[in-house]
Image (cartoon, grey):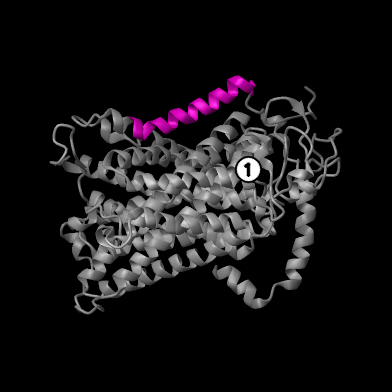
Amino acid sequence: MAKDDIKNYNGDVTTYVGAPEGNYPPQFEGTHHDGDVEKADAIGARDGRILVDGAIDENDGAVHRVLKARHMAMIAIGGAIGTGLFVGSGESLATAGPVGVWLGYILMSTIVYSMAVALGEMAALFPVAGAFTHYGARFVDPALGFAQGINYWYSYAITLPTELSAAAIVITYWDEGFKHVPAAGYVTIMLVPVWLINLWGARAYGEAEFWFSTIKVITIIGLIILGIVLMCGGGPTHDPIGFRYWRNPGPFNNIAIETVTQPNNPGFIPGNWGKFLAFWNVFVQAAFSFIGTEIIATTLGEAQNPRRTVPRAIKTVFFRLALFYVGGIFVISVLVPYTDPRLLSGDGNAKASPFVIAIVNAKIKVLPSIVNAVLLISAWSAGNSDLYAASRTLYALSLQGQFPKVFRKCTKRGLPIWCVALTGAFGGLGYMGTGGTSVVTAFNWLYNLSATTGVITWWAILVSYLRFYYGLRKQGYSREAFPYRAPLQPWLSWYGVVFFALILIFNGFTVFLKGNWSVSNFFAAYVTLMIFAVCYFGWKVVKRTKIVPLEDIDFTTGRREIDEMEERDAEQFAQQEKWWQKLGAYVF
């Protein structure tokens, strides 16, 4: 193979459709990519499409770049703020104690940051449909892109009905036992608007998520401020709690293990080892709370002015998430003792929220119902994002030649109709969550299988970035002129790769503790890794793909079109943006 040939995702020697001819951006001039490259339709990269198995068919249509900067920013923030923070944090507090849970979330914030900035650099340079599945196939191995895409699509497709069932459970705070409306009725009430919003298109999704996320952000900021006030004795009881619960029952808890022989009588592992295991368990749980941080990448093919909006979102989202999560966890660790039995009540609504427990203890009325309403909005928002992210991932797989071509079809409004239809059908599984005990158990087990996918995706993003980084160095490219450069590279990415790998390996460590072996729990923790491996090696064997050598990684395809689009949009944006719009973009 000549050095100027470029391998496509299926392993054949060809040129990417969407590549410019000859004239590359300044930062890529003087490289070895100076041969003849197939001149392609410039529309491709502009609308997010980079095909690998033939010319662009305009009859297929394409997604439209309709998501604005404010949409992108709030999607990035709201994607990781949900029931995990409002309710799930209570279980983490009960597991590790106040200091243990706080340290766990701080450490996890830094690791998620390593992924976010790496994704941001690649996304700002190549804002195309599919993003991380595209990067995995382009910079590492087509098989990695396929495995990422299939697992990510399945994860969010099966999470959609789970969130709908969770929303029905949240409503039991007001309608205990579903006395007024059956659970299936509430699932329908949640499902239909999610379908309608996504069928209307990306603009409707972006607008809905902007307001959903705004409500969530205002709520968590308000709860943090309220927590500080209660901590200082400003509530109705005028009880200055201070750090009372850090002293008694103490800063750390020892991990509790329910053995197979004594499932309802958990025992504690004593000493520092038990405290460390509790901390590690919460650390792993915290990873799942942050899942959704990467969801902004699924919007890249539909984002306006992505070279400007993506860096802006990436630069600020970590600090906001750190504030919301680390600040929120600190507040609940101060206000609620980890021995409070309500933390482990398993109600699934506001009654189990540590924020609500603190509010009830302070004898504040009405506010618990408001928090429960936000929980309902969070579940609704999550279902909305699940359908969007999964459908766009399916669309990207089709563009990459790794899913049937029919799923490339878009309507005149830029909606990948068959991707939305197939993924949306999974919403009907939400009715399983309202069935008998055995059906609910099976449904929850399916969901647990998908939970690890987010961490696998983060790990693969960092692997793709490291190949991207070392490929640039190998080919003599400079990162200086890039729209966004991730800091502390490559060390920050190696930091994330190692920790995400440890999380995946030790995710189910409790099954290996003495007397705690369970085949079902083992598979729930590790079968997703097995499925990922089957997808990776299966595609590799069938398509005979190879890891792309560093010297052959393509850094040019689609860049010229995106650069031209960005230059045009930047001039228009500068003329239209007022001072108050700039302020709003910074805040949101």
Residue 295 position in % (x across, y down)? 53, 50
- The quadrant holding residue 342 is bottom left
Question: In front: 39, or 210?
Answer: 210
Q: Is residue 385 left or right of residue 64?
A: left
Viewer-proximal residue among 121 and 479: 121
In this rendering, the answer to whether 175 lies above or below 474 is below
Q: Is residue 199 above or below residue 472?
A: below
Q: Secondary structure at mark 1?
A: helix
What residue do we see at 34% from left, 67% from top? 371
**Which residue type does callout 1 highlight?**
Tyr
Q: Is residue 369 above or below residue 102?
A: below
Left or right for 450, reference 6: left
- Give x and y (percent) for residue 15: 78, 32
Q: State which quadrant residue 376 falls in.
A: bottom left
Q: Is residue 412 left or right of residue 166?
A: right
Predominant SS of the magenta segment? helix
Evaluate whether residue 487 shows in this view: no
279 sits left or right of 469 in the view: left
Span highlighted in magenta in the image: 523-545
The spot of residue 136 in percent (x, y) is 60, 36
Give the class, few, some or many, for how many residues have Cα within 10 Å of label 1's Cα (few <14, many ≥20): many
Q: Is residue 391 magenta?
A: no
The N terminus is located in which quarter? Answer: top right
Q: Residue at x 62, y 56 (%)?
A: 201
Q: Would residue 256 be seen by someone viewing this image from the given angle?
A: yes
Q: Residue at x 57, y 55 (%)?
A: 198
Q: Residue at x 72, y 41 (%)?
A: 50
Dot 1 corresponds to which residue?
395
Q: Quadrant of the C terminus?
A: bottom right
Taking the magenta stretch, the answer to whether it contains residue 536 is yes
